[in-house]
Amino acid sequence: MNKTVNQKAWFLVLPVLVLVAFSAIIPLMTVVNYSVQDTFGNNVFFWNGIRWFEDMLNSERMWNALGRQAVFSAIILAIEVPLGVFVALNMPKKGFWASFCLVVMSLPLLIPWNVVGTIWQIFGRVDIGLLGYTLDAIGINYNYTQGYFAAWTTVIVMDVWHWTSLVALLAYAGLQSIPDAYYQAAKIDQASRWAVFRYIELPKMMGVLMIAILLRFMDSFMIYTEPFVVTGGGPGNATTFLSIDLVKMALGQFDLGPAAAFSIMYFLVILAISWVFYTVMTNLDKRDVR
Amino acid sequence: MTDTTAAPGAASIPGDVTAERNRATTARRFRPNGSAIVMGLYLLFLMLPIYWLLNMSLKTNAEILGTFSLWPRDVTFENYVTILTDASWYMGYVNSLIYVVLNTVISLAVALPAAYAFSRYSFVGDKHLFFWLLTNRMAPPAVFALPFFQLYSSVGLFDTHIAVALAHCLFNVPLAVWILEGFMRGVPKEIDETAYIDGYSFGRFFVRIFMPLISSGIGVAAFFCFMFSWVELLLSRTLTSVDAKPIAATMTRTVGAAGIDWGVLAAAGVLTIIPGALVIYFVRNYIAKGFALGRV
């Protein structure tokens, strides 16, 4: 759609601007403020330059958390995106069962995050949980509070359980928008199932799939509540992801300076990667319109 | 993606060719009903943990810890009674609902005009502004927890519902703008122009003609604001202590000196799922489009 140039449109945007400025810019400036100052208590602050940033860049703790976070997000995307697309391809197209699948699949998305953690905490327990009990009964040594591998598996399976539906619903919405004519043409050409997927369904899904990847990347990179409830970041530091580490530092130890410097770098990493996704996405949008 | 609208026309070719195609491919590629098996397994995977929670909420603690059973041997509603008769429990639900509704109303009220501006006009800095709004959706709540705490304490809003509602605007307003903009793009601009020629003022046109046209979009945006405000815990827990404490935070109470009260914990968990399930039921036909943020 070609848009009219109208500078007065700023007035329509103004309420959003004021509200978001209040709830985003003021707090962000507080963070920036802390990141360049130090204190010996009593609310007396003095200028500290970029020392906290240097400290954090040299801190092994932060790099380890970042590494764990990157591995976690990569695994999550590698499992959830193909699985979500696969589920979407198998969903009923219309009728009662389509609605039924939609409602059941959305259910995990609307459970408060710490309840998701609680559900899996219970589900995985060896004494009272179905999963833990079953695994234990067939002789697999499974204990997510002590085993490094078990903890990671639990957190990953939990996230797949929680969020794959989002990818599936997005892909499903993309599939629904493909006109029947495309399939009819493919049928006339006697295209194989794979060819239909590769040359019709995948390209038409690309736009929404990018949204799915963007949302999943952002949210998995900020994950806090669920692993915190299930493993508390343990065993040791095995599942201490960036947000968990940050909250530990800021609210637990009250190391405001380093935590603030950490926050800013954390935010910048997410921003940079999301900007790349966003640019790709808007370019796809434009190509579609043409 | 304007070809969506062309779909009904394209489907007017005689005979339901698509259905035939589906039948043909399933017969050739998979065992009969391969899709149903895949969906069945997936839905089972989704429902099992929830079933287990429900199962536990209907048992007594003695049964939970004593015997391992796939379904409750003697069903008890005691855990639910505990929650629904104790004010410190059920006020958690009331608090959560109050700030979630407040947040949804605020988010929609400010997002509607803004989304209209983004979808209809171009103005200086519009693209940058739009991306800046989205960056707030990307901001980790963990980064904002402490500054929010200090900000709302200093203006005397700590432990009030409005504080949580405003804090959740951080990620809900950008999302609402994004979704509504997607839906508004689908409404032809000619409608606006015709209305203005007919002498409608902007306000009247917007409320009387435009909002009914995108009502499904508004519903979906409201659903998403509700959802993300309902599931968030880190900010709502940081900003409240007693008077506005959300149910999700109240749940940590079950960890007492005598160990964890599993039955009550499970019952509280089940009760947090219900509002979400109700809301989904109302928007079920728009969910898929909504998750695609109106961009299909």
Image: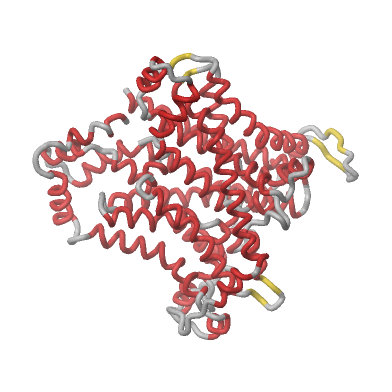
Residue B145 visible in the current orientation: yes
Nearest the viewer among B102 and B284 is B102
x then y, percent, for residue B114? 52, 28
Picture quarter with the C terminus of chain B = top left
Residue A285 lies, with reference to residue A94, above or below; the image says above
* x then y, percent, for residue A153: 49, 62
Q: Residue furthest front?
A: B199
Residue depicted at x 37% and y 21%: B189
- Is A117 located above or below residue A277 in the figure? below
Relative to A133, say whether B39 is above or below: above
In this rendering, would B241 be left or right of B19?
A: right
Residue drawn at (12%, 38%) of the image: A189
Q: Quadrant of residue B105?
A: top right
Residue A264 is situated, as x and y percent measured from the top left of the image, at: 67, 38
**Front-most of residues A40 and B88:** B88
Compared to B186, does B291 lie above or below?
Answer: below
Q: Residue furthest left?
A: B14
The structure residue drawn at horizontal position 86% and vertical position 41%, both measured from the top left corner, is A39
**Left or right: A122 as drawn, with respect to A195:** right
| Residue B263: image location, x then y, percent | 56, 75
* Number of marks in picture: 0
- Taking depth in this image into account, of B235 and B79 the one nearest to the observer is B79
Question: Nearest the camera: B279 or A248?
Answer: B279
Report whether residue A238 is seen.
Answer: no
